Structures are given as structure tokens and as C-alpha cells.
């Protein structure tokens, strides 16, 4: 292994830009909804932008890249597990549990609207099928798999956080136990296992199991880890830096495959997507990631590093948790309807919801999340008694 390392506490604009792209895709998929499926605008969105839901997959690739890289860099420390989990807790738990705590508070404040359909979607879906305790232990994705994501929309997006938290229990032990030079021999079979397991589940449980369960998303998460491993090999990273043209050619091929999925298998539950589509999108986002971390210039890199996109990425965690609920709340309270975008008032309220989400997420980042993260980084990795790096 060489000395490549993303320094702790140092923000990488390109990675923030990718986070910004990921959250922009997710928001587009949740904000641009149509009651009529035959209007010209709904046809354009459905036919040309149906893969916006894969913004979550880009988040998974980024998570694997960043977390896998940190674990590789600090594998030889005596407090490897303790420091890693303390920092992750400081990053994920405070806002997550605050958001969960706000659920009953906001629900009670809006109890007068309980007969309205939008209130039911946001707060009153059957919680007996997704028990409250599952959110405390990040197990809600297991229950969501059984009930087809049926639950209060206030908490629905947290399924992906459950997948990542479960991944955080698995990956540190794997990197600790497997010698680094042999790590790809463990990562590649696990990556290939995911589409095979998804196919098995599709044949026996053709619901959303392949979408929300950790074993089914390992290829996406581990693609990021493999990228982190690759750029820590001096020879491979130098090869990538000198052959950017090959990376761009690969990106074009992967985009062509994404075009096929757009035309014929855009839904997350189609056979093509379940079997190989998730893996294909992981490779697409992994290739994009490798380009932006190895290229010094270029139109794509310049776009990813745009300040608005990077700023969006910095507050993306808060946006992800809050954006859908704020949109439903504002459409319900102002227009008395669900989040459709059919008329000018619909569009104005959607824009107002977007601005409100950005404002609250920015406030949360600067005055709530960032101070706690800074405190979490006061726990440093100690190399005085190292586990031997192999």
C-alpha cells in the first residue's frame, strides 16, 4: 500500500460534488410527481429521467469508497474499532434520532388534519408492520422488505441508512481480518455474490427484497471499497491518471448501458435491474468516481466541482432525511393535496418546499451536525500499539 490518504477533516470538493449530484437525483425523483401520466411533461420525466432513484446507489458507492478508505488507512491502529464507531455515531446518530423524535411531535401538532390523505401517507400508515423499535436498531429495512416499503413516509427513506449501518458492522471486521494485499480476493467474490443472491430472491420473493436488503446491495457498496483500494495502489493510480481517455471510454459504454435500462428496465424491481442493473449502475458510478478523484481538469470534473453542487453535497445528509417529508407537509398544508406537480401553484409550492429544505438542512449542518462531528474527530486513531499491517 502507498501513502495515498484522504486526510481526516479535509473536505474533497469532487466528493462533495458527487454527493450533491446524488442528492439532486434523489430529490428529483421525489419532487417531480404527476397525477396524470399522459401529460407531455410527465412523459418526458418518465421516459428520460426514470433512473433518478439510483442517486441512492451513488451514495452507496461513495460510502464504500470513503469508509473503506478510512478503514484501510487506519487498519494498523490499536483503537481501530472504537474510533471508527465513535466517529460514525457522531455523524449519523444525532440528526437521525432527532428526526425520529420529531415524528410524534409533528404528528400531534397536525392532528387536526388526520382525516386528509396526505396526513395519512406521512404519519399514519400501519406501524404494526414496521415496529418502532426497528428504527432504533437500524433494522427497518428488514420489515420494509416484507411490507413493500409500506409505512409512514416520514421514515421511509431511512431504509438506506439501515443498509449502511449494517454494512458498517460488517466491513471493519473484514478489513481488520483480511491482509490488505489479499483484500480484493475477499471483496470481488462478495461483489459477485450480490447479483446472484438478488436473482434468487427475485425468483422466490418478487417484491422489493432485492432493493432494500444489505446482501443485495453489497455490489454497490463494495464497488466503492474496491475503488478506494485501487487508488491506494501507486501503480494503478498512476495508470489511471495517465489514461483518462480509457476511463471516459468506459464511462460512455456504461452510460449506453444505463440508456438501455432507461428504455427497457428503469424500475428498481424489473428483472434486468434486479439481476445486473444494480451492478451496472454501481460500475457507472464507480467509473465516475475514479474520474473525478484522478483527473486534474476536464468538463466533467469542472462540473462536479461547481460550488453550488459541492455546497449541496455538504448538507446532503440533512436534505436526504427531510426533503420528502417537508415537500408533503407543504403541499398538504398549503394546497391540501399530495405532492403532484401539475399546475403553477403546485410548482410554486414545490419550489418553496425545496428552498425550505435547503435552509433547514444548512442550519442543521452549521449549528447541529458540524459541531458534533468536530467533537467526534477529537477521538483520533492511535498507532502506538498497532495491529500488524500485512
Image (spheres, grey):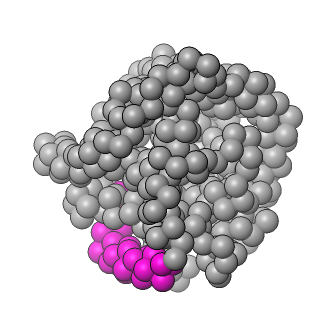
Q: Is residue 252 magenta?
A: yes
- Considering the whole magenta stretch, tell me its main secondary structure: helix
From what the image shows, is residue 324 above or below residue 100? Answer: below
Q: Kindly tell me whether residue 130 is visible in this rendering.
A: no
Q: Kindly tell me whether residue 204 is visible in this rendering.
A: yes
In front: 253, or 294?
294
Say whether residue 308 is left or right of residue 273: right
From the top left corner, tell me how far across and down residue 74 is, in percent: 55, 33
In front: 344, or 72?
72
The quadrant of the image that shows the C terminus is: top left
From what the image shows, is residue 107 above or below residue 353? Answer: above
Q: Which residue occupies 69% across, 40% down? A: 8
Q: Which residue occupies 51% across, 28% down? A: 76
Tell me where residue 171 sits by quadrant.
top left
In front: 129, or 163?
163
From the top left corner, tell me how far across and down residue 33 is, in percent: 55, 63
From the top left corner, tell me how far across and down residue 381 is, in percent: 63, 25
From the top left corner, tell me how far across and down residue 15 is, in percent: 64, 57
Q: Which residue occupies 66% across, 32% down? A: 91
Q: Which residue occupies 32% across, 47% down? A: 184
Magenta stretch: give its range.
243-268
Amino acid at each position: 500500500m502507498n501513502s495515498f490518504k484522504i486526510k481526516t477533516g479535509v473536505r474533497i470538493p469532487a466528493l462533495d460534488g458527487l454527493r450533491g449530484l446524488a442528492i439532486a437525483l434523489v430529490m428529483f425523483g421525489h419532487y417531480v410527481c404527476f397525477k396524470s401520466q399522459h401529460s407531455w411533461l410527465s412523459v418526458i420525466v418518465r421516459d428520460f429521467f426514470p433512473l433518478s432513484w439510483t442517486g441512492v446507489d451513488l451514495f452507496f458507492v461513495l460510502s464504500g469508497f470513503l469508509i473503506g478508505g478510512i478503514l484501510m488507512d487506519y487498519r494498523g491502529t490499536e483503537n481501530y474499532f472504537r474510533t471508527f464507531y465513535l466517529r460514525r455515531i457522531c455523524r449519523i446518530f444525532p440528526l437521525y434520532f432527532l428526526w425520529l423524535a420529531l415524528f410524534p411531535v409533528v404528528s400531534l401538532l397536525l392532528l387536526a388534519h388526520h382525516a386528509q390523505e396526505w396526513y395519512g401517507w406521512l404519519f399514519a400508515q400501519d406501524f404494526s408492520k414496521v415496529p418502532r423499535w426497528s428504527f432504533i436498531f437500524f433494522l427497518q429495512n428488514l420489515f420494509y422488505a416484507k411490507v413493500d416499503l409500506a409505512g409512514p413516509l416520514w421514515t421511509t427513506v431511512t431504509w438506506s441508512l439501515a443498509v449502511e449501518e449494517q454494512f458498517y458492522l460488517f466491513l471493519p471486521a473484514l478489513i481488520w481480518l483480511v491482509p490488505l494485499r489479499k483484500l480484493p480476493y475477499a471483496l470481488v467474490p462478495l461483489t459477485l455474490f450480490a447479483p446472484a443472491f438478488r436473482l434468487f430472491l427475485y425468483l422466490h420473493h418478487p417484491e422489493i427484497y432485492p432493493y432494500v436488503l444489505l446482501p443485495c446491495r453489497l455490489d454497490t457498496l463494495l464497488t466503492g471499497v474496491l475503488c478506494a483500494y485501487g487508488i491506494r495502489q501507486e501503480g494503478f493510480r498512476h495508470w489511471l491518471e495517465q489514461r483518462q481517455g480509457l476511463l471516459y471510454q468506459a464511462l460512455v459504454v456504461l452510460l449506453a448501458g444505463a440508456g438501455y435500462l432507461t428504455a427497457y428496465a428503469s424500475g428498481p424491481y424489473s428483472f434486468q435491474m434486479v439481476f445486473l442493473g444494480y451492478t451496472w449502475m454501481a460500475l457507472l458510478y464507480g467509473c465516475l468516481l475514479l474520474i473525478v478523484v484522478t483527473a486534474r481538469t476536464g468538463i466533467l470534473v469542472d462540473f462536479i466541482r461547481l460550488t453550488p453542487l459541492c455546497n449541496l453535497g455538504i448538507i446532503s445528509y440533512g436534505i436526504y432525511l427531510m426533503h420528502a417529508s417537508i415537500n408533503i407537509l407543504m403541499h398538504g398544508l398549503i394546497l391540501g393535496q399530495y405532492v403532484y406537480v401539475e399546475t403553477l401553484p403546485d410548482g410554486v409550492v414545490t419550489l418553496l418546499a425545496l428552498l425550505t429544505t435547503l435552509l433547514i438542512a444548512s442550519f442543521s449542518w452549521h449549528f447541529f451536525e458540524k459541531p458534533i462531528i468536530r467533537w467526534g474527530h477529537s477521538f483520533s486513531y492511535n498507532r502506538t500499539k498497532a495491529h500488524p499491517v500485512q
